[in-house]
Image (cartoon, rainbow, N blue to C red):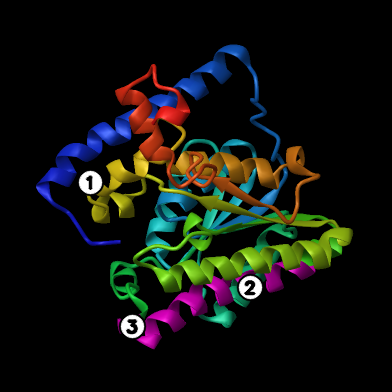
Amino acid sequence: MTPCASAELRREWPGIIQHARSGLNMQIALRQMTGEGVNMLRLKNRVGIVTGSGKDIGEATARRLASEGATVILADIAFEAASNVAASIVANGGQASAIALDLAEEDSIRALYKEVAARHGQLDFVHNNAADTRVEQMAGDMDLANMDAAIWDRAFDVNTRGTMLMIKHALPAMLARKQGSIVNTSSGAALRGDFYGPAYAASKSAINCLTVYAATQYGKQGIRCNVVSPGMILTHGAQQTVPPAQLKRIQTHKLTPYLGEPDDIAAAVAWLVSDDARFVTGQIIQVDGGITAHMPYFAENSAAFDADPTARPDEL
């Protein structure tokens, strides 16, 4: 992403966010009126970990899982941020705590699981959401001809190796009880080429492969493993780095009339770790507003139809 914190971006973001939230809030309101799709305690007595949970998708997921009855351990290298989120969850009646985690250090991962076992005695789910998306990391992840190998190595050390180790050290507790759900966060960038982010995208593509292997190797023992693959999500990071013009280009390729929010990913994760998804494993689930569902020329055809609604497709 190209760093951009212009006055234009700050002026336009509130409208973009409000448009996204109007769609999400409408869905929530309909569920509240009809009761459809609401099972607020489907995760009662479940214990699990969400990494990278101090903000954005991880925070939204931790809050959603706690609201459905789960005891959530927020694991993040930004320990203070995760602690603040956990305290907020507890203040609102949920069950949560925070533990410091550095995905680049296996000893830190071992310590996390040891502490969870000591506190709770069980592990039902893990959402591997954390990745290195610091501005300096992403700014160095541009074209391959000029990339420092350290940027590539860091992406794989944290994003891919870290996820592998989180799965590795989760398995003993899950296998002991013959049940468990692991959800890994990938990215739509793992499936399509772009002008920037090859290290990040490649590290996420490796996570897709890792997920189907984990699902295959441990499915018969009751362990499910899936991927959520977000498209453009209105995170704090996106608000700081994505220019409005780029957002408009992305929106033209969405099939939904709004961009996604962290809560949209949280809803998908909550479903995947619940028994409602008991027959779902080894899947890469695109939560992207349909941006990967259509032909490359969709946006141009859509604009042509808007210009002349009476035209036949063969006349465009």
Q: Quadrant of residue 113?
A: bottom right
Query: Residue at label 2?
Result: 164
Q: Residue drawn 63% across and 76% down?
A: 110
Q: Is residue 56 magenta?
A: no
Q: CA distance from mark 2 to mark 3?
A: 28 Å
Identity, as a three-letter code, of the amino acid under mark 1: Ala
Q: CA distance from mark 3 to mark 1?
A: 26 Å
Q: Which circle, 1 or 2, is nearer the viewer?
A: 1
- The residue furthest front is 315
| Residue 198 seen anywhere in this rendered image of the structure | yes
Q: Is residue 229 above or below residue 79?
A: above
Dot 3 and dot 1 residues touching (CB under 8 Å): no
Pick whichever of labels 3 and 1 is earlier in the sequence. Answer: 3
Crowd band around label 2 with a 10 angstrom C-alpha radius: few (<14), some (14–19), many (20+): many
Q: Position of residue 130 (x, y in %)?
A: 49, 63
Identity, as a three-letter code, of the amino acid under mark 3: Ala
Tell me the SS state at disc 2.
helix
Choose between 37 and 195: the one closer to the eye. 195
Choose between 267 and 55: the one closer to the eye. 267
Q: Residue drawn 68% across and 52% down?
A: 47
Query: Residue at label 3?
Result: 145
Please provide the residue range marked out in magenta.
145-172
Tell me the SS state at disc 1.
helix
Identity, as a three-letter code, of the amino acid under mark 2: Met
Pick whichever of labels 1 and 2 is earlier in the sequence. Answer: 2
Q: Residue drawn 40% across and 41% down?
A: 253
Q: Position of residue 214 (x, y in %)?
A: 74, 66
Crowd band around label 1 with a 10 angstrom C-alpha radius: few (<14), some (14–19), many (20+): few
Choose between 279 and 118: the one closer to the eye. 279
Q: Which circle, 2 or 3, is nearer the viewer?
A: 3
Q: Is residue 149 magenta?
A: yes
Query: Residue at label 1?
Result: 245
